[in-house]
């Protein structure tokens, strides 16, 4: 049964296809992925709904994604297209898909229909319903949502920092605060581009979050830096960020602290432009 607050398919432009290998293509940037998904969707519309034709489409569609995948053993589902009137990424084989007339063709996918039907990544178990709602509201579109939705450790570390600055758990009312959601969205944007990335942006968009850990993200060498494990370690892991010097690590920690503090201020309903009138005790917001 789908979780009450599901990160996989939402309204309008919100969806995620990370576990289907959405970003495991040569160019996982938003523009290129949009083009790829739109082309597949168009071609699939003309495919007769019968097994041989659909499997043939799957083969042609896989080739469209390019020969080189960042993680060769991680499947990229060739049946990912655009759904919801072309607004979001989704499964072309789903019974609600255009032209499927309620027929579920997901049994023809690589992992089979049962896996597609039953799999929900750990974020659904490990993030509270409110945190999942914040993720949906702050992501804004499918490309960014898919980059953050499965990153439960990164999300939990950030929300913990925000709540520490706030001095209490985030209230439901933050969902109605655009300035708070904007600050959270900027944090999410680090999955697309961050100040510390050394490799190309595309190399780091795809993450592998399954238990077999076949493709692990690099770890910060704290011992080598002579530094304790950072409270932001889960964020650095999700972003594949490492540091050559302790000062770089400390600068990155200050950057993330500032973003979390800003989100906390916005959650408390005080614009960061009015900081002087804001009641703060130590480094914690109490208003
Ligand atoms: S990675 Fe998680 S949120 Fe994304 S589609 Fe898969 S199960 Fe849903």
Image (spheres, grey):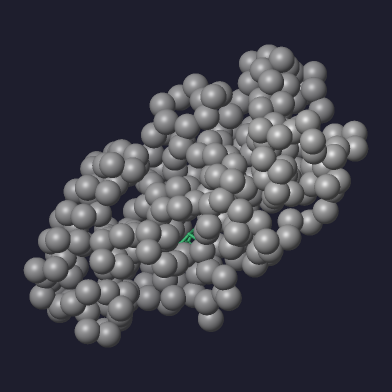
Q: Is residue 283 above or below residue 159?
A: above
Q: Is residue 256 above or below residue 49?
A: above
Q: Nearer the viewer, residue 197 or 137?
A: 137
Q: Residue at x 41, y 67 (%)?
A: 11
Q: Position of residue 209 (x, y in %)?
A: 55, 51
Q: Residue at x 74, y 33 (%)?
A: 275
Q: Nearer the viewer, residue 96 or 218?
A: 96
Q: Is residue 93 above or below residue 165?
A: below
Q: Is residue 119 above or below residue 199?
A: below
Can you name the residue that lies furthest to the right here?
281
- The quarter of the picture where residue 112 lies is bottom left
Q: Residue at x 26, y 84 (%)?
A: 103
Q: Residue at x 47, y 32 (%)?
A: 193
- The quarter of the picture where residue 123 lies is bottom right
Q: Is residue 200 visible?
A: yes
Indicate left or right for 224 with 94 as reference. right
Count of numbered labels shown in the rendering: 0
Q: Position of residue 257 (x, y in %)?
A: 72, 33
Indicate left or right for 100 with 142 as reference. left
Indicate left or right for 69 with 181 as reference. left
Q: Position of residue 258 (x, y in %)?
A: 69, 31
Q: Is residue 214 visible?
A: no
Indicate left or right for 247 with 115 as reference. right
Q: Position of residue 79 (x, y in %)?
A: 27, 63
């Amino acid at each position: 049964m789908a979780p009450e607050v599901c990160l996989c398919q939402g309204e309008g432009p919100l969806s995620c296809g990370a576990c289907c290998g959405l970003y495991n293509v040569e160019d996982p940037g938003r523009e290129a992925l949009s083009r790829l998904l739109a082309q597949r969707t168009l071609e699939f519309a003309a495919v007769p709904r019968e097994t041989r034709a659909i499997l043939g489409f799957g083969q042609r569609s896989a080739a469209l994604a390019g020969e080189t995948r960042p993680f060769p053993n991680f499947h990229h589902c060739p049946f990912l297209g655009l759904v919801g009137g072309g607004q979001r990424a989704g499964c072309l084989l789903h019974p609600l898909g255009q032209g499927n007339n309620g027929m579920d063709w997901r049994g023809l996918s690589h992992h089979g229909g049962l896996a597609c039907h039953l799999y929900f990544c750990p974020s659904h178990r490990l993030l509270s319903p409110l945190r999942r709602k914040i993720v949906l509201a702050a992501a804004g579109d499918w490309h960014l949502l898919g980059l953050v939705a499965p990153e439960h450790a990164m999300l939990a570390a950030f929300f913990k920092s925000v709540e520490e600055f706030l001095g209490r758990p985030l209230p439901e009312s933050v969902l109605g605060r655009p300035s708070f959601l904007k600050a959270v969205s900027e944090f999410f944007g680090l999955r697309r581009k961050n100040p510390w990335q050394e490799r190309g942006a595309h190399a780091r968009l795809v993450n592998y979050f399954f238990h077999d850990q076949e493709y692990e993200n690099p770890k910060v060498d704290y011992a080598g830096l002579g530094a304790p494990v950072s409270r932001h370690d889960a964020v650095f892991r999700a972003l594949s960020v490492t540091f050559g010097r302790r000062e770089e690590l400390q600068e990155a920690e200050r950057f993330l602290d500032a973003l979390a503090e800003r989100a906390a201020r916005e959650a408390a309903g005080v614009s960061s432009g009015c900081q002087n009138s804001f009641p703060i005790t130590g480094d914690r917001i109490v208003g």
